């Protein structure tokens, strides 16, 4: 039993968009662990971070991933930090995992961080850059396929993934 494909990548890599498109094309459900966590907790991820802290979120995320990997015939998208957990990385070994790669410049645009106000947003961009650099090897470790999403339409990215399914 396995998801058809599991999408990983940093915030702004297009996981939700590509997962929705693939699920439509393949005629299978789209499952997203962030959505599962929000449904279980009854509040948005941002509130979980503020109210209970990141370690609590990560434990909810781990449980959501264990449950989701038992599902069959779904397109599964994981939160950007899912691969931080060594057990999750080990669990992903048997699955068709696609790393949606993206440049910092493109991710910055997609998550809505304007480059026009460096004093306000410079720190956030630096954090995103640090996070992407630290995680890149971990995405690479779990991925069977890496697709660079810069300068590609969602259809082009989905075509590339489907060629490998
Ligand atoms: C996170 C990414 C988010 C969400 C949470 C933590 C991360 O998902 O899981 O805010 O650590 O990168 P997206 O990658 O869908 O934004």
Image (cartoon, helix red, strand yellow):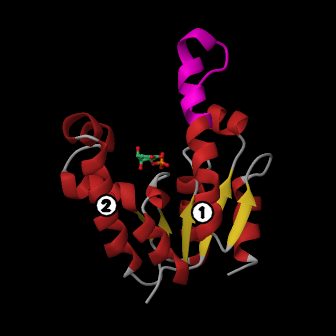
Identified at 53% across, 84% down, the residue is 94
Residue 115, visible in the rendered structure? yes
Quarter placement of the N terminus: bottom left
Magenta segment: 111-129
* Residue 53 drawn in magenta: no
In the displayed structure, would residue 78 be above or below residue 4? above
Query: Is residue 12 at all visible to an observer of this figure?
Result: no
Q: What label sits on residue 21 in the rendered view?
A: 1
Q: Main secondary structure of the magenta part?
A: helix
Q: Secondary structure at mark 2?
A: helix
Of the image marks 2 and 1, the number of the one nearer the N terminus: 1
Q: Position of residue 107 (x, y in %)?
A: 64, 39
Q: Is residue 128 magenta?
A: yes
Marks 2/1: CA–CA distance: 19 Å
Tell me residue 154's x, y (percent). Answer: 69, 55
Residue 59, position in %: x, y?
28, 58
| Residue 133: image location, x then y, percent | 64, 44
**Residue placed under numbered mark 2 in the picture:** 36
Query: Helix, strand, or loop for circle 1?
Result: helix
Q: In the figure, 131 relative to 165: above or below?
A: above
Q: Is residue 24 left or right of residue 100?
A: left
Please tell me how many numbered marks the rendered image carries.
Answer: 2
Looking at the image, which residue is at 73% across and 61% down? 147
């Amino acid at each position: 039993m396995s998801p058809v494909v599991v999408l990983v990548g940093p915030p702004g890599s297009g996981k939700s968009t590509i997962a929705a498109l693939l699920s439509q094309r393949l005629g299978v459900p789209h499952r997203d662990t962030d959505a599962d966590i929000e449904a279980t907790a009854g509040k948005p991820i941002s509130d979980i971070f503020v109210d209970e802290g990141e370690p609590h979120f990560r434990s909810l995320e781990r449980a959501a991933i264990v449950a989701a990997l038992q599902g069959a015939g779904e397109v599964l998208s994981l939160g950007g930090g899912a691969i931080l957990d060594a057990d999750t990385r080990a669990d992903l070994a048997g699955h068709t995992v696609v790393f949606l790669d993206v440049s910092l410049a493109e991710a910055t645009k997609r998550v809505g961080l304007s480059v026009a106000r460096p004093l306000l947003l410079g720190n956030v961009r630096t954090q995103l850059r640090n996070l992407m650099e630290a995680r890149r090897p971990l995405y690479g470790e779990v991925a069977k396929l890496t697709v660079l999403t810069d300068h590609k339409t969602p259809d082009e990215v989905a075509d590339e993934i489907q060629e490998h399914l």
